[in-house]
Image (tube, grey):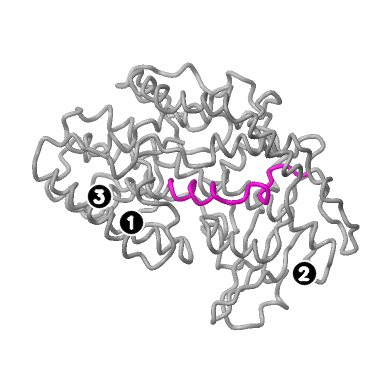
Amino acid sequence: MPPTPKRGAFLPRPTLDPRTVRAISSPSEFAFPPFVDALDLRELHDFNVHVGLRYLKQFALQPAAALAFSRRHPHPRYMDDRELLRICFETALQRMLCPTLDPIDVAAFGPLLDRPGTYYKFDTSALNLTRALPGCYVAPTVTLLYEAPDGTREVLATRIQSMTLTPADGQAWRRARYFVAYGLSMQMVSVPHVPMHFGHEIAWPLMRRELAPTHPWYQLLAPHFRFTIPLSFGALYSSASVTRQHPLRVYSPFGIDAESVNRLFEVGCTGLEGNSAYPRYQFPLDGPKFVGDYGVFHRGYHRVFLDFASRFVERAPPDAAVLRWFSETAAHVPGFPDGAAPTPVLAGALGTLLWNVTVGHAADHHSYGEQPIEMLPQRLRVPPPTSRDAEAVPDDAWTRPFDMARLFLCWKLFYEANPSTTLMRTRYAFERGDLQVVASRFFDGLREWDRSMPVRRYVPLDTVTQSIQY
């Protein structure tokens, strides 16, 4: 791995001219999608007032609650099969289930693949690229889950340290489960969710440069990119970022170093070749492909956004400046259509972009943030099993109380949903009445899907954020 960049080496001084867009391919040597360092002072001030102050307030108020939490939960609580299946099939973490078993998985689990039904893997192979902090341990796992035709589900096996363990392996199985829970927690915040932040956001600074604030397309996107660029800049480059892993950052819970955090972010965008659980990022032009109920929930909302975008484009067709914006964005975002694409495709990209920065992002945070923190550790202080006859480990050996306090602070500050502005309160600055009618119909469509969806609501519609703001 390349050395961790020193402070200050991540990025040149940000540009404070909103007309200037500098696409940075990476905050260091890592292969992030291009990030834009053009910060508009007005956007920065708006972010600090509405989001930055919220962080400061929470940081001032939560330490006492974090210490109280660590007294109640000085170590992680064991995640049994029932709870693992619930988290994997009934929360946003379902998006990480992979229904495709690669040859290496078939070789490991072959004797267990003998029943009709669907097999899924939950794969944390990306943790191979990480380096644990002193006193902490990391181990990738691949866990095999089974869903019978009647809906019955089982946890069949876990691959760890070149061993395929089953429940018959007693303490080795139990010890491996902590690493499965760790992988669930770390992967969610650092791999599949990352492109929802960084995969496409160059689109907004490019539009901000290309179009006047009175342009209908600018007026459509402006509310949905409010706070986004300052938030991302702070997350990737601020010395106060949770990703920097400075010991004094008491809200930084990771058991891996800063370089490793960036490596996981990178994998969220580049994927892992040959592993179906880690596809390379492509702008999801055809909508979300999550399995199960989480996919049903999102695809229903995605259809509403596509309808909105199609009606908007019908009344405000892309002009030369908008087509130029599509082409400029496509040069940086894999899978984003350029200006030569048919109009329905451009409308689809617009709808997908709006879905991503609202419902797509908010549901991940809301559902994950509701899960029992104590079951999803982000530091472990016991090594993984190296044999099937592993010895029992005392519960209090897995972490220290301060590790759990760090996790609580991070959860409250960065993982839980904390909306400042919400989707259903969005007001577009359209000067044309027909566009306001289209917007009104859009909100009606959102409410209709919220009322009629046949699956659980992974985020209440009234709390869906207007933009990415946490």
**Nearer the observer, 193 or 335:** 193
Q: Which residue is mark 3?
A: 346
Inter-mark Cα distance, 2 to 3? 49 Å
Quadrant for the N terminus in the image? top right
Q: Residue at 33% x, 50% y: name it.
A: 352
Tag 3: Cα neighbours inside 10 Å, few (<14), some, or many (≥20)? many
Tag 2: Cα neighbours inside 10 Å, few (<14), some, or many (≥20)? some
* Element under disc 3: helix
Q: Is residue 372 magenta?
A: yes
> Sequence-wise, which precedes: disc 2 or disc 3?
2
Q: Is residue 446 magenta?
A: no
**Chain part drawn in magenta:** 361-380
The amino acid type, in three-letter code, at marker 2 is Thr
Inter-mark Cα distance, 1 to 2? 39 Å
**Nearer the observer, 276 or 61:** 61
Q: Position of residue 285 (x, y in %)?
A: 35, 54
Q: Residue at 47% x, 42% y: name it.
A: 417
Inter-mark Cα distance, 3 to 1? 15 Å
Q: Which mark is residue 302?
A: 1
- Is 57 located above or below residue 384 in the figure? above
Q: Which mark is residue 166?
A: 2
